[in-house]
Every structure is written in C-alpha cells, then in structure tokens.
Amino acid sequence: MLWTPANAEKMPAAADCAAACAAACAEASASATGANMESLVIFALIVHGCILFYVFLLLSKLLVKLSPMTKEQLPQKVQVMKTISAAEESVDNSEFSNHFGEMHVKSLPELPLADAEQRAALHSLREMVLEVGGHDNAPKMWRERLADEQWCCRFLVAREWNPVRAAEIMLEALRWREKRQPIGILTDASDPASEALRHESCTGKIVCPGRDRHGRSVIVFDNSVQNTKDHVGQVRLLAYSLEFALRQCAPHSDKICLVVKLNNFSLLNNPSWAVTKETIRMLGNCYPETLGLCVVYRPPQVFSAIWSIASPLIDPRTSSKVMFVTGDVSEGSSNDRMLSELIAPEWRTLCGCETPV
C-alpha cells in the first residue's frame, strides 16, 4: 500500500512494522536454531557410533593379523565370542582355562628344528631375504635378525611354513625396524633413549607387570592415561614393551597376554589414526604369532555388539582368544573366577584393574 495523505491513518506505524518483523525473525530463528541443534545432536551421535565401530574394526583386523592359523590347526568347535557376565555362573572353570590357557601358550617348534621340511623352509626364507638385502652387503641388523631361529620361525608359523609368504612380511618387518629403530635392552639410565621412554611411559599407559599363571608375559594397555601426541615415541614405547615382554615369557611359553582396559574409554584420549594404523601394521607383520589371550576389560556396550557382528569374519582360532569382561567383577563372581583361571588369582593387582586412574 502506497502512502498518501488520505490513507496515512490506515498505514501501520514504522515502529510497529519493525517490531513485527523483529518478532517474526526471532521466532523463525529460534525454530531454526532448535532444529539445527537437534540435527547436530543426532549427527554427533551418528559420528560417535561410526568412530567406535571403526576403532573396533581396526582392533578386529589387528587380531586377525596377530595369529593366522591353518585349517588343520583350527579346533572343531570354537565359541566365537566369550562375554563373561555375572549371570554366567555355570561355566566349567577347568574347561575354560584349558581352552584359553594351554591352547594358546606356545605355537613355535622346539629348536633346533627336527623336521627336515621345516629346516628347508627356514633355509629358503633366509636365502630369499638375504638376496633382497644383497647377501654379504645386507645390513648388520638384517643378519642379526636372521640368525635368530625363533624370530624366523614366528614368520614361518604365521604363514603355514610357506617361505615365500613368510619372506614378504619379514621384509616389511626388517624395513620397519630400519625406519623406527626399536630400542633394545637399556642399561644406561642417562641414555637419551631411556629418557624418551621414561617420558612416554611415566603415566602407565603401557605396562608389563609380569607373567600370568601360564607363563605368558602380560601387557596392559590403558589409553585413558595417554600423555603425549608424539606418534613415533608412542610406537617405540609399544615396540620396546613387546620386545621386553617376549623376553620375559617362561621357557614353555612364546605368547603374550594382552589386557586392554576400556573402562575409562573416551574419544578424547583415543590414539590418533597414524598411531592406530602403524600399530596394526607393526603387530601384524613385525610380531606375528605373539598373541595368546586378549582380555577386553569393561568396554562400552557398543563394543560387544560390534564384536558379535565382526567376529564371524575373523579366523575362529583368533576370535577364540578374545574375551570381553563386563558386569560384576567382585571377589567370588563369575568374572573373578574366570580371570583367576585365565590370568592369575591376583589379576587385579597384576593388571591394575579396578584401581583409580
């Protein structure tokens, strides 16, 4: 409506128009803001679930690489997932211990090798790797590693004694060692490497507290106390811990017992993608035939659901080594009895479970 002296009284005042417009805009903005907030919350929940799913798929891939087995070695009946809760009071402890303990304590053959085919496979593996390295011109570290029969046998067992397939992952392992130079035994506390490890390990995010009742070295992961963002330092600490743990195994064992504490899991302290990717590659190809038991302690509920979906895709023998601990862990509970059988009666003290962070 155009303003004229005749219709001036019929026209609303400018202030009234401005107020009406402001009110309409505020209402629309509030409605849009409410809708946007709801969308953001839904989006955040979806992203959170996807990240958890992705993290657990990476863990599943890691477990596959840690312990590939031949079809002949697979047990006839394998329970894919072992989720222990307070309701499972009727489990036979001795059978459970036998399945998880004795079955996954040692897989490497006795040395020196008595089987002629195994000796031939070992010889072929060494020759293939040395050929790539230049034989006499091969790096000193390569020759030292190849002289360790037990180390070579891990790769052969992991690849069903096929020297060609074993050479593929061994070469990757040797190149990784050249790049990262994992730290060996430290005897000098003033060494810069000692100081770097001391800084990385001071919060106890990776500890090797001792052996379980089956002679396997125990390694405890607790990323809730992560204290650095140094990708290389974190990987070197893990490598040092693995090297140390394997040296501490009892003579009748060549496996580790891995305890992953997730009771304080948060995406805020989750390892970076670079660390996760290299960890999977390192444990799968540089430390094959290492896992004896993996205890996932008090994970968020979504982890168990994801595992039930992902576990059929994993080698049955590998998945049989994974146990989820949820529910009551008080003394005398089902969880307490199972962990006492699988790890040790003093599992709480050994693994630092149920202790304040």
Image (cartoon, rainbow, N blue to C red):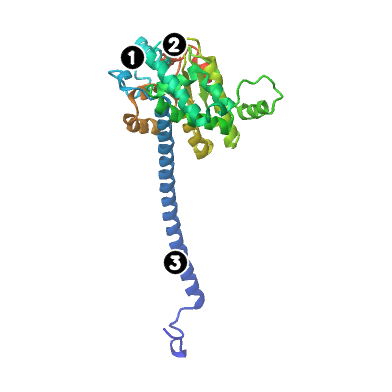
Is any atom of residue 262 visible in this view? no
Residue 226 lies in quadrant: top right
Indicate which label's residue lies in the foreground, 3 or 1.
1
Horizontally, residue 262 falls left or right of residue 78, namely right
Q: Label 1, label 2: how many angstroms apart (C-alpha)? A: 34 Å
Chain-order first, disc 3 or disc 2: 3
Q: Label 3, label 1: how many angstroms apart (C-alpha)? A: 66 Å
Q: Label 3, label 2: how many angstroms apart (C-alpha)? A: 83 Å
User: Which SS class for mark 1?
Assistant: loop
What's under tag 3, amino acid-wise? Ala
> Is 251 placed above or below 155 here?
above
Is any atom of residue 212 visible in this view? yes
> Residue 106: x and y, percent?
43, 14
Q: Residue at x 43, y 63 (%)?
A: 28
What's under tag 1, amino acid-wise? Val
Q: Which residue is mark 2?
A: 110
